[in-house]
Amino acid sequence: MRSELEKLIELQITDTTIRNLRNTLGNAETRRAELEQEFEQHAFSIRERQNVHAGLKAEQATLEKNIAENRTYLERADRNLKHAQNQKEYETAMREMDSLQKQITTFETEILEKQGAIEEVEKELSERADEINSLDAKRDEALAAFDQEIEKARAELAEAEAKRGGVFDTLPANLASVYNRLVQRSRDGIAVAEVVNGSCSACFISLRPQVQVEVRRMDSIITCENCTRILYVRAKLEQSEAAA
C-alpha cells in the first residue's frame, strides 16, 4: 500500500504541475498583451509630451509670424502718419499704430509664455532621454523573455503529461477510479492532500489525533473525514524516499 500511496502522491504533484502550466499557457496571450500595453503606455506618455512640445513650437512660430506681419503693417501705418494730409488721416494712422503695437506686445507676452512651457517640456524629455532611447530595446527584450518562458512551459507541460501517463497506468484500477472521481469533484483538482500542522491542507479541517497517526503509518489509504481527499504527510514521504 505504501508504494501505491506514493504513486498517488506523485500523480497529484504531477497533476498540480500540469494544472498550473495549463493555466500559465491559457493566460499567455492575455499576459503578453498586458506586457505590450505596459510598454505602450510608456511610449504613449512620451509621444504625448513630444506632441505637446511640437504643438508649443508651432504656436510660437505662428505668434512670431503674426508679429512680423504686424510690424510690416506698423511700418505702413507709420508712413501713412508721416504723409497724413489732414487731421482725420493723422488720427486714423495713430489709432492703427496704437492697435498694432498693442497686438505686438500681446504676441510677445504669449511667446514668452510659450518659451517657458517649451523649456519645461524639453527639460522633462531630457530627463527621460535614457527611457526614450532604450524603450524599444527593453520592450523587445521583455517580450523575448516572455516568449522563452512560454516555450519552456510548453516543454514542461509535455514532459509532465508524459510522466503522468506513466504513473497513472501503474495504479490499480480501483485507486485510479477513486483518484479521478476526487479530482473531478474538487474545484482545485486536488485528490491527495498533505497534512500540515495537523490539518488537511485542502479543506483546512483539523484532523483527529488517531487519524494523524494512521496517516503517518502510510500502510493504508486514509481520507479526510470532511472532504474525503486522500491524506499524506510529507515528512514521512521524504523518509520513505530516502530509504528507497
Image (cartoon, helix red, strand yellow):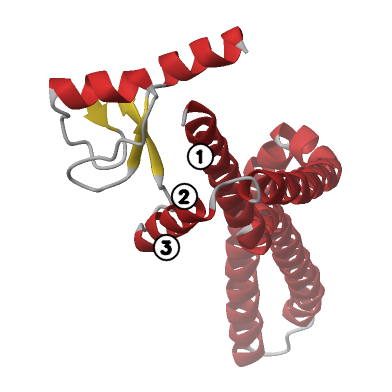
Residue 4 vs residue 206, the one in the foreground: 4
- Chain-order first, disc 3 or disc 2: 2
Question: Of the residues tagged 3 and 2, which is closer to the observer?
Answer: 2
Instruction: Residue 37: tell me if it is visible.
Output: no
- Helix, strand, or loop for circle 2? helix
Label 2 crowd bin: few (<14), some (14–19), many (20+), radius 10 Å: some
Q: Residue at x 74, y 72 (%)?
A: 66
Measure how far apart labels 3 and 1 are at the Cα level.
15 Å
Residue marked by disc 2? 175
| 137 on left or right of 109 | right
| 60 on left or right of 227 | right
Identify the image quadrant of residue 138. top right
* Rendering coords of residue 74 (x, y %): 74, 73
Dot 1 amino acid type: Leu
Instruction: Residue 213: tell me if it is visible.
Output: yes
Q: Residue at x 31, y 41 (%)?
A: 202
Contact flag, marks 1 and 2 (Cβ < 8 Å): yes
Contact flag, marks 3 and 1 (Cβ < 8 Å): no
Identify the image quadrant of residue 33. bottom right
Residue marked by disc 3? 184
Residue marked by disc 1? 8
- Chain-order first, disc 3 or disc 1: 1
Dot 2 amino acid type: Leu
Dot 3 amino acid type: Gln
Q: Is residue 186 above or below residue 17?
A: below
Question: Of the residues tagged 3 and 1, which is closer to the observer?
Answer: 1
- Helix, strand, or loop for circle 3? helix
Question: Of the residues tagged 1 and 2, which is closer to the observer?
Answer: 2
- Helix, strand, or loop for circle 1? helix
* Rendering coords of residue 198 (x, y %): 22, 22
Residue 122 vs residue 42, the one in the foreground: 42
Quadrant showing the C terminus: top right
